[in-house]
Amino acid sequence: MLSNRRHSAILVCLVALPCLAQTYEPVPVIQLSPEESAQARRLATGLREAQDRSIAAEDARKSFGQAYQAAHPDVPNLQFTSDLRHAFSYLPSARDGVRKMNLIELSPEESAKLSAIEHESSAALEAFQVARSAWQDFKNNLIAHHTPVSLPATQNTASNFRQITDPNLWAFGPAFSPDFRFAVPASRPY
């Protein structure tokens, strides 16, 4: 029995050895110029700030809706009309087939507050989309500028509709060092 355990342990070690003796391929790296590094830092910061603004605007929208709902507990599942002057909720279906609703007119102050929240939410979302597009274009252009064309490639399109050859290795974009001086393929296993 001891002999079988020893053989099993040796067999497990021999099977595991190829995993331990793996060779690792070097990972391609892009060393960004000082200008590229500064641009990456600026765009990444802008993206993070735009995302934070968008999240804060959405939180304000939800908070207003929850507070308004709490102030009107007798009217469940409130929604707001597109003119931002009324809140409503559907009533249970009637037998006559006509859908009815409860309607509450917002005060001028409530309507102004909701309008400001909706305006900020819309502006924040637009700013986030612009920042995300600029960041994606930067990454695509960085890869196109720094990678050899002889590698197998797929096509990426920047938001300005230019075709960019993107080697498959970089298909998931770059991962950046904290100082934005170096980038490696994000698609490499960790």
Image (cartoon, helix red, strand yellow):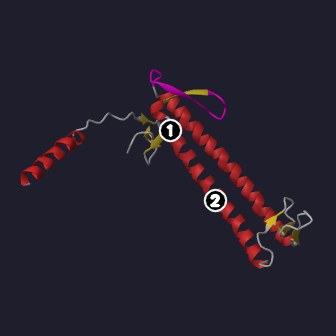
Is 42 within the magenta? Answer: no
Q: Is residue 137 left or right of residue 112?
A: left
For residue 36, above or below residue 47: above
Q: Give coordinates of residue 84: x percent, y percent.
A: 84, 63
Q: Which of these two is toward me, 104 or 118?
A: 104
How many C-alpha atoms fall within 10 Å of the one at disc 1: few (<14), some, or many (≥20)? many
Q: Quadrant of the N terminus?
A: bottom left
- SS type, badge 1: loop
Provide the residue span drawn in magenta: 148-162
Q: Which mark is residue 55?
A: 2
**What numbered label is drawn on residue 173?**
1
- For the residues labelled 1 and 2, the Cα–Cα distance comes to 24 Å
**Quadrant of res 49:** bottom right
| Between discs 1 and 2, the one toward the N terminus | 2
The numbered mark at residue 144 is none
Q: In the rendering, at what x and y percent does residue 102 appear?
A: 87, 71
Name the image quarter holding residue 14: top left
- Nearer to me, 80 or 15: 15
Q: Position of residue 150 (x, y in %)?
A: 45, 20
Q: Please, what is the dominant secondary structure of the magenta stretch?
A: loop
